[in-house]
Image: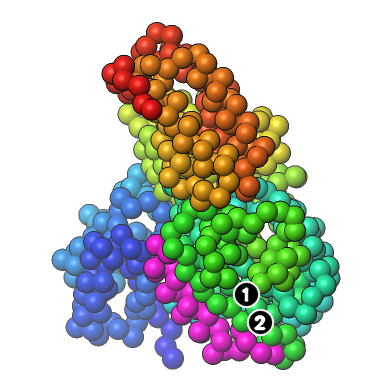
Amino acid sequence: MKTARSMVLVSADPESIRRGSEKIYSTFQEELSQLGLQDEISLSWLSDSGRHNALPMVVIYPEAVIYGPITPEDVPYIVEEHLNKGRIASSLVAPIHELSGRIAWLSSRKGTLPAEKRIVLERAGIINPEDVQDYILHNGYKALGKVLITMNPLDVLNEVDASGLKGRGGAGFPTGQKWRFVSKATSNKKYVICNADESEPGTFKDRLVLEGDPHSIIEAMAIAGYAVGADEGYIYIRGEYALAQERMRLAISQAQELGLLGDNIFNSGFNFNIHVHSGAGAYICGEETALIESIEGKRGEPRSRPPYPTTNGLWKKPTLVNNVETLANIPAIIRKGASWYRSIGTPKSPGTKVYTILGNVNATGLIEVQMGITLREVITIYAHGMKGNSTFKLAQTGGSSGSIIPASLQDTPMDFESFNKAGVALGSGALLICNEDTCIVDLCKVLVNFFKNESCGKCNPCRIGNDRAYQILSNIAEGVGTMQDMKDLESIEMYLYQMSNCGLGQTAGTPIKDTLSHFRAEVEAHIKLKICPTGVCRMSGHKVN
């Protein structure tokens, strides 16, 4: 088979498809055929690669030229100029300020943007996610082969433990330690679950992995199964992620056809099968025990713990639950070794972190950078500064349950230890960047309202506490709050943390805690002076019951 001299990748994320990328793809096919270039030019799809301002986009290798946003009418010119005559169609090249992530790095010819350090997203946007052979060509399934041929389960556990990888779902629990708990559990049946519910507002990093590199999760789950003694796995995917589910099912089918899933993988005697389970949009199912209940066909409500899933999980069997980003690190760790992984990030928080950037900045999107970067660096380098030269006021990390970070902490390294020492949490990695026009009372009210609506209702502190907190915040925003309200909010936050049944309820009070810790004066202005310093809250003087 003749090797293609060029590769054309057309963006295939949902937004690109909505804007007509399928027509762009078919037009490329027609134009290349008319010029007799179909055997010289490889045409494929590009998974989601960052922000959406330049979509639909086309990336052409080996020149690494990015065109976008383009229309089907632009295709003949690109084919004629770039692919036939060898001249870059400069008028259609995507402006650097319209791009982020790896695509921005590729487009930065003079290195004006620092390259990201990509492990989790190493292949996303580079390979065709619907072609297992493309994954294999990019070191796919090498780690699984290495594990099954040259390592025993204890070797794998030791390597993951030595890497220092911590859970990327928000809690930061040592991954190797969790794997050991499941490995040591005695049972004739064990399970591995990938938590791909990703229901935190503003978080879409897992979707990018599922849609852009699905085989990496299959490979990681198989490695985990071998290490802990499990022969069956489930990928629990958020119900709204239709494309992710479609690609994961296709990837599982392809892996089964090649003998990379199923019985006697690599003739090792190891058996492992994976199922895709679709969630129904419940936020609570991001909590691992509620997720397990959902898979079992029950109402998605958290279980009381102990016992923990590591000993009594799915159908009361030992179960390993890791989120997408955590698992996506595993193949690279096995291939390159724990020492390599520890050379990245910080000594106590090795590796990288994937962040979604949203809010009052010039460039939103998704990045993967080394642990220990600061908020100031993220905003300056990757978000291209605050929008309209506004002033940074705060950032919220990790969705609704994440911490509210004031400007005074923007130079704190973003790793688990540094943030814990500062009294805040890293969370899942969603960064909502807010300027001085953001009202802290209004923001806190919105976040508490989310928990009020999403509470599963199983325990009183969460069901009643969030509703009461929302009423109090509404009164403060209306100009009828009292100083006693602030004390009541502090009590509610304490009871949520100490008495809620699950981790989601326990963190529901985080916005309240951070608001009163870092922005107390602004809240008091609403109460004592009956004014909103930002002008967001309209003081009507009507009490909310």
For residue 328, say whether it is visible.
no
Q: Is residue 217 above or below residue 267?
A: above
Q: Position of residue 260 (x, y in %)?
A: 61, 84
In the rendered structure, the answer to whether residue 325 lies left or right of residue 347 reads left
Q: Which portion, as a residue range, is magenta?
A: 239-264
- The residue sitting at 39% across, 68% down in the picture is 242
User: Does the CB distance between marks 2 and 1 fall below 8 Å?
Assistant: yes
Work out which quarter of the rendered image holds the N terminus and state it.
bottom left
Q: Amino acid at mark 1?
A: Gly
Name the one closer to the observer, 96 or 319. Answer: 319
First in sequence: mark 2 or mark 1?
1
Q: Which residue is mark 2?
A: 272
Mark 1 crowd level (few <14, some 14–19, many ≥20, 10 Å Cα): many
| 504 in relation to 165, above or below | above
Q: Secondary structure at mark 1?
A: strand
Q: Position of residue 301 (x, y in %)?
A: 56, 57
Q: Which residue is mark 1?
A: 233
Element under disc 2: strand
From the viewer's side, name the closer residue of 501 and 387.
501
How packed mark 2 is, by other alpha carbons closer than 10 Å (few <14, some 14-19, many 20 or more), is many
Looking at this view, name the residue that lies furthest to the left.
73
Overall secondary structure of the magenta stretch? helix
